[in-house]
Image (cartoon, helix red, strand yellow):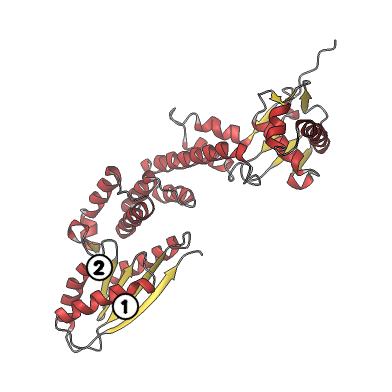
Amino acid sequence: MKTKEPREPNDMLKIYGLGRFKVKYADKEKGIDNWTSNKALKLFKYFILHREKELYNDELVEIFWPDVDPNTGKKRLYNTIYLLRKNLEMKDIVVNKTTSYKFNEDYKCWIDWEQFLEIYNNLDNNVTIKRLKQAVELYKGDLFPALRYENWIEDTRTNLKEKYLDILYKLSEKLYEENKHVESLMYLNKGMEDETYREDYYNLIMKNLAQTGRMYDAISTFENYRRLVKDELDIDPGASITKTYQQIRNSKLVQQQVSLPSNLKGALSCDIDVFNQIYELEKRQITRSDKTFTILAIDFSGLTIGEQKTEDIYEEMARIFRAGDIISFHNYVINIILHNMNLDKANFILNRIFKFLRENNIGKQPEFDFKEVSGKK
């Protein structure tokens, strides 16, 4: 019997499954559009994912043709294997073993998600920033994105996604340690595109923002996280992120920029420039969610109560709002950002304000202007 010659390295089969799908072999490339059978394409993906295993006919029929009788299923499997080989133009890519099939081990493979996992598996071995960036570059998106409703891929896809978030965090952490704060934030924001609840992300974002002097953004990040986990998970922030918040909150730079309420009660008070920057930040962040906030302007310029009286009202009024709301005073106008509140829900805020004004003997009402800001629908 003639021994088969090993395949040369330049005949390596290259398979890309992260965020897209294509196969490269020698001078040929096969993308999704090159397949005449969608079922054959799905079957090939299954073989690649389990290429080190022997896959029995009954198992394959149960996964791909669960609603047909076993004999019909085996015939369809046989025909689909034929189409798989034909589409790839590789007659021996899958080996028939009578009651099972197996991916041909003579084909040496380079697979993007396996390269990604190789880097991930060295996270604890002082992996370099360069290698971490290579892993991020490999991860173009979810594994086999076209297979959104196939149960057999879901666990692997989710596992890879979690590992991707781990790598992004590790890379961001190393960049933070090297004082590359803008770049660190860039990679953290990539992870935040998936609306992660991970506290370590928010914590590191706050640290980066604080190191670049963006104290109001750091504080706003904490407030956003606190509302998120309270609204969605009904939990409070953990000890680590709360400690970071307290450190930022008590810094001298914060005392110069932002006046924080004691015991986290009442709105966060700041000057108008900081208020405007927080407003722009909130608008950018909310576009990735279905949340809503309302901005309220209370204009006292038509009242003859004087600037000092208006400032006193402003300082007292800050206490009637919620922790996490943002308040500022400029040119007789009090501006407030009301988080997680649409116009319909803002009526009870108006009632609270009217009651406050009456208690402070403000006979004539100031002018009110409400604006609702919503994210994606």
Q: Is residue 348 above or below residue 14?
A: below
x%, y% of residue 227?
A: 34, 56
Which residue corresponds to mark 1? 297
Kind of residue sitting beneath label 1:
Ala
In which quadrant of the rendered image does the N terminus lie? top right
Counting residues from the start of the chain, the first of labels 1 and 2 encountered is 1
Q: Are marks 1 and 2 in contact (CB under 8 Å)?
A: no
x%, y% of residue 201?
A: 39, 46
Which is nearer the eye, 66 or 324? 66
Front position among marks 1 and 2: 2
Kind of residue sitting beneath label 2:
Phe
Residue farthest to the top, as pictured: 1
Label 1: which secondary element: strand
| Left or right, 178 with reference to 376 | left
Which is nearer the eye, 225 or 273? 225
x%, y% of residue 322?
A: 26, 64
| Left or right, 63 with reference to 129 | right
Label 2 crowd bin: few (<14), some (14–19), many (20+), radius 10 Å: many
Which is nearer the eye, 218 or 200? 200
Instruction: Say which residue appears at 81% left-offset and 44% top-offset.
Output: 36
x%, y% of residue 304?
A: 18, 89
Q: Is residue 358 above or below residue 60?
A: below
Would you say residue 50 is visible in this rendering? Answer: yes
Q: Which mark is residue 321?
A: 2
Instruction: Say which residue appears at 34% left-offset and 65% top-offset.
Output: 339
Would you say residue 335 is visible in this rendering? Answer: no
Q: Which mark is residue 143?
A: none
Q: Name which quarter of the figure residue 5 lies in.
A: top right
